[in-house]
Image (tube, rainbow, N blue to C red):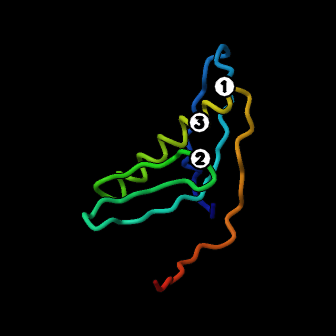
Amino acid sequence: MSGGIDQRRWIEYPASVKRVLKIYEFPVVVEKDEKGYFFVYAPSLQGCYTQGRSLEEALKNIREVIQLHVEDRRALKEAVPYRKPVSFSSVEVRV
């Protein structure tokens, strides 16, 4: 931040709250179908996909799906997959 007042707001939780929040970042793929719906999925998380009537709705929905997926994995003490995206490309196929 450059020369201003720090605008971040800190939330103080009671001592009884011991949940540690971790921030995860996952690549997602968004496609638009012929009817105008947005389909979005997280390739590194099996079964994490959803759709929305708008891009914003689809991204909101995938955040919820990913959050539930990660919470389940953590509750079962399973590793949360991490893959660093290298590239995203389209390929043309002639049939």
Q: What residue type is labelled 2?
A: Gln
Instruction: Measuring from the top left, give residue 64's x and y in whole percent.
Output: 47, 40
In terms of sequence position, does the residue under pointer 2 or pointer 3 come before the other? 3
Residue 46, numbered label: 2
Q: Which amino acid does label 3 sit on?
A: Trp
Between 93 and 47, the residue placed more toward the observer is 93
In terms of sequence position, does the residue under pointer 1 or pointer 2 come before the other? 2
The answer to whether marks 1 and 2 mark residues whose Cβ atoms lie closer than 8 Å is: no
Between 59 and 7, the residue placed more toward the observer is 59
Instruction: Measuring from the top left, give residue 2's x and y in whole percent.
Output: 63, 64
Q: Report, in whole angstroms, how far the alpha carbon at label 1 lies from the one at label 3.
A: 27 Å
According to the picture, the residue beneath numbered tag 1 turns out to be: 75
Helix, strand, or loop for circle 2?
loop
According to the picture, the residue beneath numbered tag 3 turns out to be: 10
How many other residues sit within 10 Å of disc 2, few (<14), some (14-19) or many (≥20)? few
- Splitting the image into 4 quarters, where does residue 3 fall? bottom right
Mark 2, mark 3: which one is toward the viewer?
2
The answer to whether marks 1 and 3 mark residues whose Cβ atoms lie closer than 8 Å is: no
- Splitting the image into 4 quarters, where does residue 1 fall? bottom right
Q: Report, in whole angstroms, how far the alpha carbon at label 2 lies from the one at label 3.
A: 35 Å
Mark 1, mark 2: which one is toward the viewer?
2
Would you say 95 lies left or right of 88 here? Answer: left
Q: Which amino acid does label 1 sit on?
A: Ala
Residue occupying image coordinates x 57% and y 52%: 5
How many other residues sit within 10 Å of disc 3, few (<14), some (14-19) or many (≥20)? few
How many other residues sit within 10 Å of disc 1, few (<14), some (14-19) or many (≥20)? few
Residue occupying image coordinates x 51% and y 62%: 29
Helix, strand, or loop for circle 1?
helix
Instruction: Measuring from the top left, give residue 70's x and y in whole percent.
Output: 61, 37
